[in-house]
Amino acid sequence: MRFIFMFILFFFFFSKAYSEIAQNIINTLEKADNYNFKFTQRINEKKETGNCILVFNRKINCKYDKSGKILISDGTNLIIKTDNSDIPNFYKLKNTTFYKLLDKQYLIDELKSNDIKRENGKIFINTVYQNFYIKVFFDKEKSYLKGWKTTDLYNNSVYTEIRIQEINKIIDKNLFKINQIN
């Protein structure tokens, strides 16, 4: 009987601690309109770094350091352009995991409806969008978005770790005009 009582007590405190973490993350997300961050991305075994500006209405502008690759979403479309090609690749944003990752309300709803998990010192939620499994990581201390792990359109494993530099900075809306990319 004592074991059952201790188990229930442990479960109660454990659940409460994780619900507080989720609420802190939700509160931080609600206050954020945009992030300026550095990233490290691993696609299978290939590692790339760069900088991004993410605006939580499904817009993102990323520049990769060494490859010169550019990734831009205007909220509806996503383009990826590399230095070794004159023609950018165009995608409908809703056909990619970015459609949900760049949607603040979606992340908040997922935090409210999913249990936060912990693995190897990282906290995250699991979600699914159009048969893509997405693991979204959060910083426990600062309650920021920390990165994601998913599968890209070519079925490659993609892990992106982000380090936020600034929050809610003034953003030039021209950064997300994909028709200017040649």
Image (tube, rainbow, N blue to C red):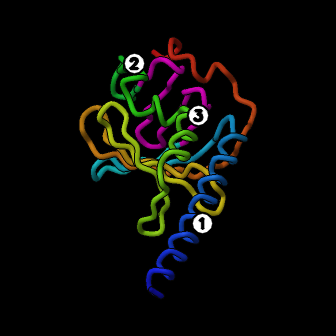
Which amino acid type is shown beneath numbered disc 3?
Gln
Q: Position of residue 48 (x, y in %)?
A: 41, 47
Q: Position of residue 3 (x, y in %)?
A: 44, 85
Compared to residue 75, the image places residue 156 above or below, namely below
- Marks 1 and 3 sit apart, C-alpha to C-alpha, by 23 Å
Q: Is residue 169 left or right of residue 109?
A: right
Determine which residue is flagged by label 2. 92
Determine which residue is flagged by label 1. 17
Which amino acid type is shown beneath numbered disc 2?
Lys
- Marks 2 and 1 sit apart, C-alpha to C-alpha, by 39 Å
Eye-nearest disc, 1 or 3: 1
The residues colored magenta run 51-79
- Marks 3 and 2 sit apart, C-alpha to C-alpha, by 20 Å
Which residue is depicted at the point 64% across and 40% down?
35
Compared to residue 121, the image places residue 112 above or below, namely above
Eye-nearest disc, 3 or 2: 3
The image quarter in which residue 176 lies: top right
- Structural crowding at the residue carrying mark 1, measured as other residues with C-alpha within 10 Å and reported as few (<14), some (14–19) or many (≥20): few
Residue lying farthest to the left in this orientation: 155
Which amino acid type is shown beneath numbered disc 1?
Ala
Secondary structure at badge 3 equals: helix
Of the two numbered discs 1 and 3 on the same chain, state the one appearing first in sequence: 1
Eye-nearest disc, 2 or 1: 1
Picture disc at residue 157? none
Q: Is residue 30 left or right of residue 81?
A: right
Main SS class of the magenta portion in the image: strand
Of the two numbered discs 3 and 2 on the same chain, state the one appearing first in sequence: 2
Q: Position of residue 110 (x, y in %)?
A: 50, 42
Determine which residue is flagged by label 3. 105
Q: Position of residue 165 (x, y in %)?
A: 66, 49
